[in-house]
Image (cartoon, rainbow, N blue to C red):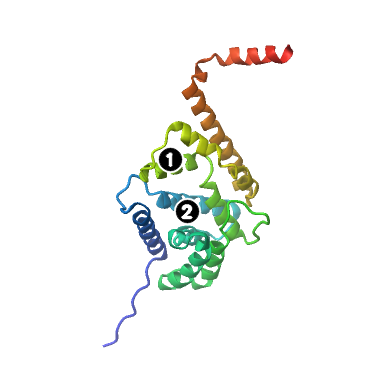
Amino acid sequence: MNSQPTPLLSWREAARAAMHDASLAELRGRHGTADVSFNYRWEHVTAVVALALRLAELTGADAETVEAAAWLHDICKFSDGERHPIAGAAYARAFLPTTDFPAGKIDAVAGAIADHMGLWRDEPLTVLESQVLWDADKLAKIGLTAVFHWTGGSLAGKRLHTLAQLIHRARANDWMPRTVSSMHTAPARRAARARLAAYYHLYDALEDELSGDDLSDPLSKIVGQRGEAGE
């Protein structure tokens, strides 16, 4: 009796499941349990997948390559730290052949994962799929997405902060303008500038609320400023 070959796993379902398992392992490693209020790594990766697919649509990058790379780009983040892009690339080379992912695209996936390190770049990447993953990963770290991800992560870790501390932490992230300047694709550059402006505006508005500055008549403030400038 001839044995039937084992069918390959659906690459998308397998990659998603592998990343989810890795995110739970990270929670257990960081907090001693996966039963926390917010899974930062999972939220980050799913945001990167959505952004990478949208950027692929807008730029003509290969959608399968960038989606697979997005699902797996942080799979070794907790275990390998600063080396996680190289470790993640090796993981992808070993993992994707066990699925139905196109064999001819595996090198491109691994290359994009290996290239995604760093919050900014002195030299731009040259391969479109690497550019798209890099841009998607960094877009998920700025703007309002970052505000809620970081706040959720802090609360999940039971590292309680005052609002003043959260504002200070947010304003200490002086790398964000360099990240915006490092974006590769035109859609990412436009979105990054808008996200950074929204990020700063949110904390400006929060400070106004906490201090009561929002109680002032905005028109009166403008007139007062003009009067002072004319003195």
Horizontal side of 177 relative to 213 (left or right) equals right
Q: Position of residue 148 (x, y in %)?
A: 44, 40
The residue beneath circle 2 is: 49
Picture disc at residue 151: 1
Q: Position of residue 104 (x, y in %)?
A: 53, 72
The residue sitting at 62% across, 43% down in the picture is 177
Q: Amino acid at mark 2?
A: Val
Q: Amino acid at mark 1?
A: Thr
Viewer-nearest residue: 161 or 26: 161
Viewer-nearest residue: 98 or 54: 98
Horizontal side of 208 relative to 20 (left or right) equals right
The residue sitting at 49% across, 28% down in the picture is 206
Q: Secondary structure at mark 2?
A: helix
Examine the rendered structure and indicate whether residue 145 appears above or below residue 164.
Answer: below
The residue sitting at 29% across, 86% down in the picture is 2
Examine the rendered structure and indicate whether residue 7 appears above or below residue 11.
Answer: below
Q: Image quadrant of residue 18?
A: bottom left
Q: Position of residue 191 (x, y in %)?
A: 58, 42
